[in-house]
Image (tube, rainbow, N blue to C red):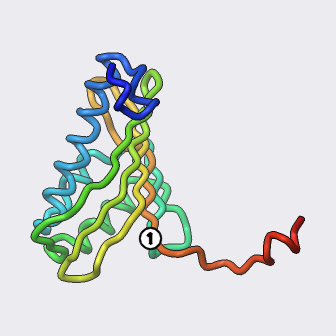
């Protein structure tokens, strides 16, 4: 392994590298469809068996695929972007679970998207499916804290 790679990548096995590529390809395929108004990519990779979701616009967690499928159906054919940026993807994996984190930037016909995304994948038989998804806005810290000197 090259010393130019980040430390976490220097010790990855060929299997881990292959899994990272696979998980990233699943996500990018879903995004490619999503920005053409087709939500079926996410409907497919998000687990029907065990799924939770935090959306930046909703205060509660969604606890099942059925509820998120209704949400996806409500935006089907409504969100479009000519391109998007998929920045700094990182996959960390153990046994049958993998966590993909990345930043997403896209200027859509509805909103300008700037998200930190976390997708937790689990191997369900022969398929990798997302069992948890979090999409949070990238924005400056909004809480007010006392100055560090006042805390110490």
Q: Provide residue 126's location: percent of width, then percent of height.
A: 27, 24
How many other residues sit within 10 Å of disc 1, few (<14), some (14-19) or many (≥20)?
Answer: some
**In the displayed structure, would residue 42 be above or below residue 35?**
above
SS category of the residue bearing label 1: strand
| Residue at (25, 53) in percent of width and height | 43
Q: Position of residue 149 (x, y in %)?
A: 85, 71
In terms of depth relative to the viewer, which is nearer, 102 or 42?
102
Q: Which quadrant of the rendered structure holds the N terminus?
A: top left
Above or below: residue 138 compared with residue 17: below
Q: Is residue 90 depicted above or below 145 in this figure?
A: above
Place of residue 103 in the rendered image (x, y in percent of width and height, measured from the top left): 36, 58
Q: In the figure, residue 9 lies in which quadrant? A: top left
Residue 131 in which image quadrant: top left
Q: Residue at x 17, y 77 (%)?
A: 78
Give 128 or 107, whichever is nearer the viewer. 107
Q: Is residue 23 left or right of residue 133?
A: left
According to the picture, the residue beneath numbered tag 1 turns out to be 137
Please, which residue is most extreme toward the front here? 4
Q: State the residue at coordinates (26%, 53%).
A: 42
Residue at the image position 20 percent from the left and 52 percent from the top: 30
Pick the quarter of the image with the C terminus.
bottom right
Nearer to us in this view, 104 or 53: 104
Which of the 4 image quarters holds residue 40? bottom left
Q: Where in the figure is residue 79, as x and y percent of width and height?
A: 19, 74
Disc count in the image? Answer: 1
């Amino acid at each position: 392994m090259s010393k130019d790679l980040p430390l976490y990548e220097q010790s990855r096995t060929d299997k881990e590298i292959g899994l990272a590529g696979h998980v990233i390809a699943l996500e990018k395929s879903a995004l490619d469809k999503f920005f053409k108004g087709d939500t079926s990519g996410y409907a497919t990779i998000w687990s029907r068996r065990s799924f939770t979701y935090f959306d930046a616009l909703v205060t509660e967690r969604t606890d099942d695929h059925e509820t998120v499928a209704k949400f996806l159906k409500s935006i089907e054919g409504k969100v479009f972007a000519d391109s998007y940026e998929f920045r700094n993807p990182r996959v960390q994996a153990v046994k049958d679970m993998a966590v993909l984190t990345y930043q997403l930037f896209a200027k859509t016909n509805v909103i300008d998207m700037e998200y930190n995304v976390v997708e937790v994948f689990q191997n369900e038989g022969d398929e990798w499916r997302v069992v948890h998804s979090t999409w949070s806005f990238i924005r400056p810290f909004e809480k007010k804290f006392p100055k560090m000197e006042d805390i110490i």
